[in-house]
Structure formats: structure tokens, C-alpha cells
Amino acid sequence: MANKKEAYLYISAMLRAREPRMLSRDKAERMLEAASFEDCAKLLTDCGYEDMSQMSAKEIELALSDRRGAVFAELASLVPDAAIVDIFRVKYDYHNAKVAIKAEAVGSDEGSLMSPSGRVAPEALQAAFNEDRCRDLPGRLGAAMDEAKSLLARSGNPQLADFVLDRAYFEELGDLAQQLESPYLTGYVAILADSTNLRSAVRTLRMGKDVAVMRDALVPGGNVSVERILAASTADGIAPLFSGGLLSDAAALGAAAAEGGAMTGFELACDNAVMAYVSGAKLAAYGEEPVVAYMAAVESEITAARMILTGRLAGIAPGVIRERLRELYA
């Protein structure tokens, strides 16, 4: 136990020392206001990124994916509980599963869309899928892939297959949080599930779909149960379910979005609620909280960097990009 505490003290101190170099709102603003895309990209090198000033959009995506993968690999080699890193890696396993299943459905090779940031290398996941060895994949992933593949073959509806994988993803997040016996991680998984379910409920209502469609889209593990969301089943009924916590702003915006209002501010508020939860880890001296917060911050940073760089490269006005930026940890 002493060695574990010492390990977390060391890792927490190391990550705290890195925080000043991370992408802050001020640094992001300077990237937005840079005279050119090249100048914008060079500013990101101050945060430890490679120089992407001469890269295409595809090359930028690959560079950012490599950055994420390197952070995950480094932390997995340091933390006493590797499952902490898996909380973040598992998302990319399920993303790759969706890519593999859809590629088979349309008869194309979509390998370039897979991410290297998961627990399973994309090539190994694809091989397991092609050779009917999904049972060899970790956690709930293999069984979920088999179920999604079968459902897609029967229904021809890729969205239903995605819903199967989404539910399995959140079930696996819950498994990992329970394994780690961490209240903070349990809370992190819950805010992710609540944010996902609020989005799904709003989109379902906005499209005029019925409760059966909403039921398929909802995931387990949130503070607000699936049953309570289904029982409410209207914009006015669902918003109050989320109004007492970090998602209160998103809930208010969601009620308007469900009736045809703007989605951008609502989506932004959902993401900001998750970052607000993560930012609470700044009060923790050591333990899994700083590690989880750092990985979430890296994810947020990479999302912002991608949005700014690809937006500036495409000639999108800085004001338009600014409106879509999420809160940053640093």
C-alpha cells in the first residue's frame, strides 16, 4: 500500500508540473487570432506538440492521435492500476468496433478511420472480427461486436448496431470503475452517461421519434436512470431530471433544442458539464483523481487543437471556431 501511495504521489506531482504547458483558453485565443494557419500551428508547439504547420488535415489527425496514444501508453506504464487508463482507452476500442462492422456492411476498407488509442491494436481487432475470434477481445467488447454484427445483418440498420456497442461501452466503463473501487471514477462514468443520455433524449425528441427509439439510444450508469428518462419522455419532463447538478445549464438549453432550437450551445454545455466534474480533481493532492483529470484534459486539449487547426486550415472564421470550443482544463 505504501508503494502504491508513493507511486501516485510521484505521478500526481509529475502531471501537476505539466499543467502550465497545457492548452489554456488564452493560448487557444492566440491560436485563433494568429495571422496565418502556419503561425497558429507553431503556437501549439509551446504545449509540447510537434510542428504541424506544414501538415494536411489528415496528417494533423494522425499526429493528434499519436499524441493521445503516447500519453495513454506512458501513463499505463506508470500507474499502479492500469484500469484507470483503460477508462479512456476503451472508448477507442468501441469506436474501432463500429468502424469494422460498418465496413463489412458496406463492403469497403475503412481501416484508416480506426484509432490507435484503444487497448486493442486496430489490426488485432480487425483480425479477430474477420476470423470470428471476437471472444478473444477484452471485457464486453467481443460479445458486443458479435451482437452488433448479427443485429446489423438482420435489420440493415447501422444505428441499432451502434446502440448495442454504446450500451456495452458504458457497461464496461461501469465494470472498470467498480473494479477500481473509486468514488471519483464512479462519478466520472455517471456524468458521462448522464451527458450522453441527455443528448440522446433531446435528439430523439427533436426528430419526433417515439419512446421505443429513445429506449434503444439510452445507456446505463447515469445518476438519472433510463427508466426515469423514459417515464418523462417529453422536453418539459426530461429537462428537470438533470436540472439539479452540473448538467443544469445543458438541461435548460436542451429543452429548447428538443423543440427545434439551436443545438450548438446545448452540445457545448453537455461537454462543459463533464469538464466541470473533471476540474474538481484539482483539489486532490494525489491518487487516481489527478491521473483521470489529466487524461480527460488531454482529450479536451486534443479536441480543441483539432478544431482550431483544421478550422484555420479550411479558412473558417475564428469567431465561428471560438463558438464551438469547449471548456479547457488548464
Image (cartoon, rainbow, N blue to C red):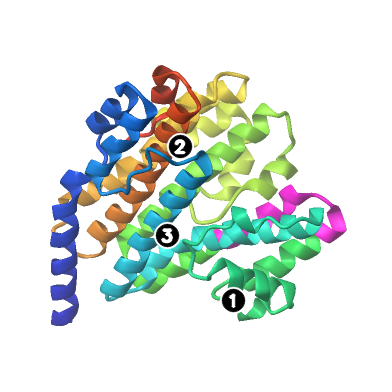
Magenta span has 2? no
Q: From the viewer's perspective, is the residue at label 2 or at label 3 nearer?
A: 3
Tell me where residue 74 sits by quadrant: bottom left
Task: Return the residue found at the far front.
Answer: 54
Coordinates of residue 178 in the picture (x, y in percent): 41, 69
Amino acid at the residue labelled 3: Phe
Gap in angstroms between the C-alphas marked 1 and 3: 17 Å
Vertical placement of residue 173 versus 16, above or below: below
Q: Which residue is mark 3?
A: 88
Tell me where residue 285 sits by quadrant: bottom left
Mark 3: give few (<14), some (14-19) or many (20+) Cα within 10 Å. Answer: some
Tell me the residue at 67%/53% (across/down).
162
Relative horizontal placement of residue 286, taking residue 322 as reference (left or right) = left
**Label at residue 137:** 1
- On the rendered image, what quadrant is the C terminus found in? top left
Q: Secondary structure at mark 1?
A: loop
| Stretch of the chain drawn in magenta | 152-169
Q: Which residue is mark 2?
A: 242
Which is nearer the N-term, disc 1 or disc 3? 3
Amino acid at the residue labelled 2: Phe
Which is nearer the N-term, disc 2 or disc 3? 3
Amino acid at the residue labelled 1: Leu
Tell me the residue at 62%/19% (across/down).
260
Mark 2: give few (<14), some (14-19) or many (20+) Cα within 10 Å. Answer: many
**Label at residue 81:** none
Count of residue discs: 3
